[in-house]
Amino acid sequence: MNFRNTLLIKDGHLHIGGADCVKLAEEFSTPLYVYDEAHIRTMMGVYRDCIEEFYGGNGRALYASKAFACEAIYAIADEEGLGVDVVSGGELYTALQAGFPPQKICMHGNNKLLHELCEALDAGVGRIVVDAASEADLLDAEAARRGMVQDVLIRINPGVEAHTHAYVQTATPDSKFGFSVANGSAEEMVTYILSKPHLRLRGFHCHIGSQIFEKQSFVLAAEKCLAFMRDMRDRHAFCCEELDLGGGFGIWYAEGDPARTVSAYREDLKALFGAVKAGCAAYGLPLPFLYLEPGRSIVGEAGITLYTVGTIKDIPGIRKYIAVDGGMFDNPRYCLYGSVYTALLANRADEAPTERVSIAGKCCESGDLIGVDINLPAAETGDILAIFSTGAYHYSMASNYNRNLVPPAILVKDGKAEYIVKPQTYDDLVRNDVLPARLKKRSL
């Protein structure tokens, strides 16, 4: 098995960040999201240092909040010298609660609500990515009310199709995101923004998708963006100062995925920065301040989820189900995308697999599965099951379906663990419920 970050097997148990996963399950209970702080900092450092080494420091990595947002991750990003991107008022509020510098925050999204735009303006966020003409109108009007000029980027769609799941491709011609370069709507938006007295156009934003392993997709997107920058200079005398190339770098989930080493990420980034420099030289453009938005590649492999095995149901000749105390409420990605994972019995980590099973959740849904055709030793009730690479888009997408509790998250460093997201309680579930007086049970 290809272990990532600080995962290792010791005395028959799985360890992460120097901590015994079995003991973590005993202390914090399950289901449990576990994050390796060292891996998070290492990956943040990769992006920060590559911008310095290969692009002269003329840029900034923005941690993509949607991968995993909590106050602790924002504090770590700030310590590591990153900015952050946010796509909702909730993400913005969390970052500000953590004391994150607002000028290093970039806000984007395809349907930012009026109150979210106002919150961003009032906070003094550094950049807002415009994704609709009506949004530009609202933003210009609200900036005028505040007597300010807001720096903005325009999200453009360069038409690059990344080889990834259709639901996470965001720069194909049919997308809810951005303005198409090919049909002229991106150019129209440039002239529209330039006419707004309280908006200052700094440049362009592009994001081609997620879980991408082909660096050529990123290079091609950069080249198309640079050609658009050249055209906007030549046609409208607009010199693009900033370019945000988004995120989307893939991670290892299971056999068949490339094992993404630090060296591999560095080579991809070197190629991307090289393409930007070459394109600018060819078109006579000044090097733009460059943003990247890594999320999954920072926290994805840093996280595992621990479960306790419950009922086991063997249907002869059909399937064997291993049920756990979690499910689609803490990991909806198999249901959404058919995502493939690697699993291990954390308390019997040195045992070889002997059977192929499906891992079922506890929700009242036939499709509540975390994975199928998973190779494991013969599991027993009470075993601790670890699912790898669950640091991104798991807690972020969790729900209270069936009124299950969203699991807590802990951060492990040098063998010591502490909460970064506290456990929910039943009181949390009913806190916002309102029982009208007419429905209250009357005493006899």
Image: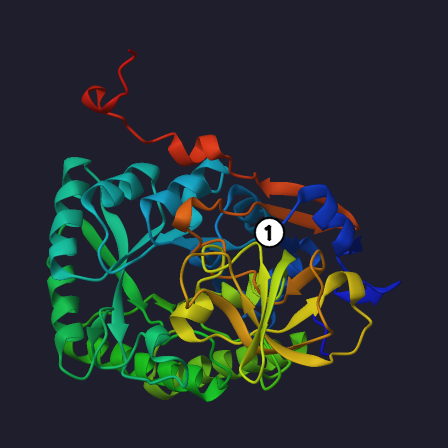
Q: Secondary structure at mark 1?
A: loop
Residue closer to the observer: 95 or 234? 95
Q: Position of residue 362 (x, y in %)?
A: 50, 56
Measuring from the top left, give residue 408's x and y in whole percent: 57, 45
Query: What color scheme is it?
Result: rainbow
- Please indicate, yes or no, whether residue 292 appears anywhere in the rendered image: no
Residue at left offset 47%, top offset 34%: 426
Q: Is residue 31 left or right of residue 247?
A: right
- At which x and y percent is residue 322? 60, 67
- Residue at mark 1: 31
* Kind of residue at badge 1: Pro
The answer to whether residue 246 is above or below residue 441 is below
Residue 329 visible? The answer is yes
Query: Residue 399's spot in the image, x, y percent?
Result: 41, 51
Answer left or right for 239 relative to 79: left
Tell me where residue 72 sits by quadrant: top right
